[in-house]
Every structure is written in C-alpha cells, then in structure tokens.
Image: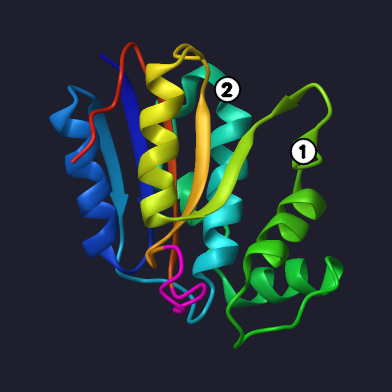
Amino acid sequence: MGTCVIVDFLNRTTSVEVKHLFEASGFKVIPFFNTKQVADACGDLAVTSALALRAMGAEFAAITLSKLREGNRETLVNRNRQAAGLDLLPMWLADDQLLKLAAHLGDPVHDPHREWLHGPLALDAFKRVAVDLTRHGATDETHIVIVNKSTYGSGEGGTHWFTVAWTAGGPVGEE
C-alpha cells in the first residue's frame, strides 16, 4: 500500500503505537528506534530527521540510521540552537521553536508553493491528519510530520518529539 518511516531516538512507546497504526493499514513500516539521544534534544533530532528525510525526496525510505544519527551530538545541537536564536540545552523545544529551527537549518518550513512539514502535531491530531491526508488525495506525495507524544489539550506540552514520514497508495485506517 505505502511506505512509512518512523524515527524516534528515545521513547518508543508512542512511536510503536504509530507503527501499529500504519501496519494495520497495510503500510511497509521502517522503524528507526534508538535508545540513545542527547538529553532534552528530541525536538532537535525530530527536526534534523525531518530535514534528512525531506532531502531524500521520494527515496526517503532508503535513509540510513547513520545518516539520522548525525544530528545526535550535544555540540551540534547547541550550535544549531544558538544559530537559530534558541536557548541552549537543557531545554525542551516548543512547537514554534521546532519550526524556527527547521527554517534555520533547511529550506523555509512553509514554502509558498507547497507545505512539506505538517505540524508539529500532538499524537491525536497526527492520527487525524494521517487519516485525512491518505483518504482525501495527495497519496503520492511524501508527508513528513513531527509528532509529540502528548495529546491535544492534555497540558503536557512538548514532552517528547519524533518524526514520521510516509507515502501512501491508499488510506490509513483509524483505530
């Protein structure tokens, strides 16, 4: 049906839930789960993963773990944050800071001709977006979303970020 890549450098619980959602809909899922991440840098790694996947274009599923790990260094995280005008570690990034970092490190986040980065989104919002994007057209496009393990309105804020990219040949089902 389609291909999905999930990148999570720390907390697999929520990303495994997303993995099962896509697998249940017939997707080939390529998980990049790791347990070693620079402390408090999940947002930074979600951004650098999103940019690396975007750079691969339609071949995003061919990305390697070593390529994704390139941003997982404290000195690089702090250098990127400083250049983007953000607080240095230890500090979690909020939604707007993720977008600012993505804009600084790569192409503008919201290209006037095409949005490439959907979100960042809370988990429940992500599930709705994944369902909508695959049911209502745009199935051949590569979609990239930075997802937070919290749910909308939970009050948790940005507690853990991970990245999901997919190209679908059909709809993602709802749980």
Residue tagged 1: 110
Q: Residues within 10 Å of mark 2 (few under 14, many from 20)?
A: few
Which x, y percent locates residue 133?
A: 46, 25
Magenta segment, principal secondary structure? loop
Do the numbered discs 1 and 2 sit on residues whose CB atoms are within 8 Å? Answer: no
Which x, y percent locates residue 148?
A: 44, 61
The answer to whether residue 50 is above or below residue 171 is: below
Disc tally is 2
Q: Which mark is residue 57?
A: 2
Q: From mark 1 to mark 2, how far is it between C-alphas?
A: 17 Å
Could you tell which of marks 1 and 2 lies nearer the N-terminus?
2
Q: Quadrant of residue 111?
A: top right
Q: Nearer the viewer, residue 5 or 118?
A: 118
The answer to whether residue 45 is above or below residue 41 is: above
| Viewport quadrant of the C terminus | top left
Q: Residue at x 37, y 18 (%)?
A: 135
* Residue 66 is one of the magenta-drawn residues: no
Q: Identity of the amino acid at label 1?
A: His
* Residue 154 is one of the magenta-drawn residues: yes
Position of 90 with respect to 131 (left or right) is: right
